[in-house]
Image: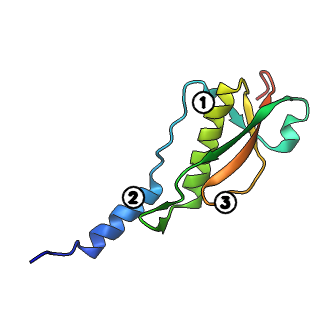
């Protein structure tokens, strides 16, 4: 007779998956900062990037903060490849996807 998985174990696994951050910054992406539109007024626009992550795992919605942090990390990684050093979110998160403007601001922190 097959035994169904313990409900508690399934809930714990899903909770752990929601908290996991699977996206890591690259060495160059770690140097890119996330800023607001007001902070990039003196910067040169270097392009834009649209990034996506899973917002659901096994049909369960992942935490908003985790998804937002992963999207920002992917945007930072992408900005570094485009020669930028700053990203600004230009859209809301929709189905795990967000758009960012990429800027070259020099050594501003």
Q: Where is residue 95 in the image (x, y as percent from the top left)?
A: 61, 60
Gap between marks 1 and 3, in whole Å? 24 Å
Q: Is mark 2 on a helix, strand or loop?
A: helix
Position in image of residue 70 (x %, y %) = 57, 46
The residue most toward the bottom is 1
The residue at the point 68 percent across, 31 percent down is: 79
Depth check, mark 3 against mark 2: the one in front is 3
When the figure is inspected, residue 62 is found, relative to residue 75, above or below; the finding is below
Secondary structure under badge 1?
helix
Q: Nearer the viewer, residue 41 or 48?
A: 48
In the rendered image, residue 82, in percent from the top left (x then y), is placed at 70, 27
Percent position of residue 78, x then y: 64, 33
Residue 34, by quadrant, is top right
Element carrying mark 3: loop
Q: From the image, which quarter does the C terminus lie in?
A: top right
The residue that appears at 76% across and 40% down in the rendered structure is 35
Q: Dot 2: within a 10 Å radius of its alpha carbon, few (fewer than 14), some, or many (20 or more) residues?
A: few
Pointer 1 residue: 30
Q: Distance between the residues labelled 3 and 2?
A: 23 Å
Residue that appears at 79% across and 21% down = 106
Q: Distance between the residues labelled 1 and 2?
A: 25 Å
Front residue of 8 and 62: 62
Query: Dot 3: within a 10 Å radius of its alpha carbon, few (fewer than 14), some, or many (20 or more) residues?
Result: few
Query: Toward the viewer: 36 or 60?
Result: 60
> Badge 2 is on which residue?
16
Say whether marks 3 and 2 touch (CB < 8 Å): no
Which residue bears the numbered disc 3?
Answer: 94
Q: Earlier in the sequence, mark 1 or mark 2?
A: 2
Mark 1 / mark 3, whichever is N-terminal: 1
At 78% from the left and 33% from the top, the residue drawn is 47
Q: Residues within 10 Å of mark 1 (few under 14, many from 20)?
A: some
Quadrant of the rendered structure where residue 33 is?
top right
């Amino acid at each position: 007779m097959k035994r169904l998985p313990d409900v508690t174990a399934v809930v714990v696994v899903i909770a752990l998956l929601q908290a996991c951050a699977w996206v890591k910054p690259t060495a160059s992406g770690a140097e890119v900062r996330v800023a607001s539109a007001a902070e990039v007024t003196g910067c040169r626009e270097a392009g834009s990037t649209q990034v996506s992550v899973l917002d659901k795992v096994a049909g369960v919605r992942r935490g908003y903060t985790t998804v937002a942090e992963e999207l920002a990390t992917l945007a930072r990684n992408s900005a570094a490849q485009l020669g930028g050093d700053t990203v600004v979110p230009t859209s809301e998160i929709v189905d795990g996807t967000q758009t960012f403007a990429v800027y070259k601001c020099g050594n501003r922190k």
